[in-house]
Structure formats: C-alpha cells, structure tokens
Image (cartoon, rainbow, N blue to C red):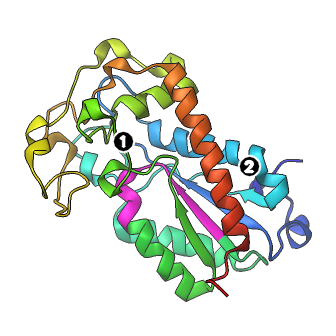
C-alpha cells in the first residue's frame, strides 16, 4: 500500500488518516550549491529521507508522506542566478495553508522534515504558530542537523562544512551519483572563523551572512573527499535515527 498522501482518494481520507496518524512534510530548497552540485540537493535529500522513513516504519506508525515543498527560504543564495526563494512570510503562509487543509482530517501530528539549514529558525517559529492556530502537535526534524544549529561537521572542515561540504556532497553522491561533478570541487573553508571563540558557525553569537560572503563559489566546506560509500552510511544512519524519533512523536503528549 502506498503511504503517499496524494495517492489517496478523497473518500479514503476519512478512514485512512486518523487521530493516530503522523503526517510527514518534507521541506527542501532549490538553490546554488557551488559548481559541483545541482540546485536540487536539499529537496532531493528531504524527499528521499522522508520516503525511506516511511518505508522503514510507515506501516508501523501510520505515517503519511505529504508532497515535498521544493522551494523555500533561500535568500542567502539569491545572489546566484538559478536560486528560487520564498520570503519568510510566504513560507509561513504556505505552511499555514497546508495546516489549515490538514485540520480538515482527523490527523493531530505534523512533522516538518527540513533539508535546508536556512529554513531552520523560520520552521521553529512555525511550530508554535501552527500549534496555536490549528491545535496540531508539530515537530521539526532534519536529515542532518545543520552545524550552525548544533549539528556535527568534520574536523577537517573545522566545524564549518555547512553547505555543499563533505557530508552533504557524499549523501548526494549516494542518492544521485550521476549529478555530482567532483572534479569541479575544491576546499572552501573560512579558516579564520575557526579562531573565534564566540562569533562563528555553531558559536554563542550568531551573525547574518550570504553564501558568497566567504568565497565567490558560494559553498562552505571541503567536498573533495566525498564518496558515495560515506554518503550511504550517513543516509542510512539518519533514517534509522529519525525512525526512532518518529516512534516518540507517535506517543508524544507534553509529558502527560
């Protein structure tokens, strides 16, 4: 049985989507990732991760996969032709409209699976807005937590493999090997930031930035050692961890 929400017929919704169902909404982006990766990286990773989670535990946990939002807030890459970006207000309005539609079903739980780090703070805000407005229990997950928000990055990248770096390139090599141009990749790590104690990615002081503030190629990290084998390990581990997290989402009720 398909667990893609859009494969249901209208009359099937009432029986298929219940109060115990989890609706899983992948959110990606269409934005530049340097000369070695296509614009599609973030929404491909979000979509494929959601699909793998549903294959892993969709029947067990009654998960329905919503259509992927492929375009989101990417204005840190808007300097690059090809990037498609929504304003924060438009992104929130889209999530609000989707949630309004969901509220016509019996579903009570909505999980946002975010494949684009630049969305993170806005999606955190959306969790409470959607909870308040529609009464949904809302959750935010990432295939890979962005290093700027506490996620891991490789030691070689000095904690700054945040966009088009080793891990992201490896995962995309696993998912779409024919679309990676590793011969065009070089090391692009802002070494001087690593000397800061506070003002740096993952530091105690955040800062506004555009991706071409660091180098004209617009990616941040060192993808030169990326491999599909590394990407497969990272992807499968992510799916396992997120599937475990979904089991907690299934029963979450504010500690009651």
Mark 1 or 2, which is nearer the eye? 2
What x and y, as percent, mark residue 164? 34, 34
Name the residue located 61 percent from the left edge and 59 percent from the top edge: 25
> Tag 2 or tag 1, which sits nearer the N-term?
1
What x and y, as percent, mark residue 51? 68, 44
> Which numbered circle lies on residue 31?
1
Which residues, given as a range, are shown in magenta?
A: 110-121
What x and y, as percent, mark residue 28? 48, 49
Name the residue located 34 percent from the left edge and 42 percent from the top edge: 83
Q: Nearer the viewer, residue 36 or 11?
A: 36
Q: Which residue is mark 2?
A: 54
Q: Is residue 211 left or right of residue 250?
A: left
Q: Secondary structure at mark 2?
A: helix
Q: Secondary structure at mark 1?
A: loop
The answer to whether one can see residue 151 in this image is yes
User: Which of the 4 image quarters holds residue 236?
Assistant: top right
């Amino acid at each position: 049985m398909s667990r893609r929400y859009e494969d249901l017929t209208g009359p099937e919704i009432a029986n298929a989507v219940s109060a115990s169902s989890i609706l899983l909404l992948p959110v990606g982006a269409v934005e530049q990732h340097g000369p070695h990766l296509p614009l599609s990286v973030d929404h491909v990773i979000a979509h494929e991760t959601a699909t793998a989670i549903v294959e892993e535990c969709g029947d067990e946990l009654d998960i329905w996969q919503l259509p992927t939002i492929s375009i989101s807030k990417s204005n840190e890459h808007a300097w690059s032709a090809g990037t498609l970006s929504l304003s924060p207000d438009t992104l929130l309005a889209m999530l609000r409209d989707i949630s309004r539609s969901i509220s016509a079903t019996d579903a009570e739980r909505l999980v946002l699976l975010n494949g684009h780090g630049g969305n993170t703070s806005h999606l955190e805000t959306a969790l409470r807005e959607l909870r308040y407005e529609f009464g949904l229990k809302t959750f935010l997950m990432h295939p890979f937590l962005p290093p700027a928000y506490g996620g891991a990055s490789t030691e070689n990248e000095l904690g700054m493999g945040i966009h088009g770096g080793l891990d992201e390139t490896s995962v995309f090599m696993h998912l779409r090997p024919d679309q990676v141009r590793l011969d065009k990749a070089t090391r692009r790590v802002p070494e001087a930031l690593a000397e800061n104690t506070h003002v740096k990615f993952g530091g105690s002081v955040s800062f506004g930035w555009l991706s071409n503030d660091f180098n004209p190629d617009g990616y941040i990290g060192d993808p030169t050692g990326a491999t599909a084998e590394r990407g497969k390990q990272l992807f499968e581990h992510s799916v396992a961890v997120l599937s475990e997290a979904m089991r907690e989402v299934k029963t979450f009720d504010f500690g009651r």
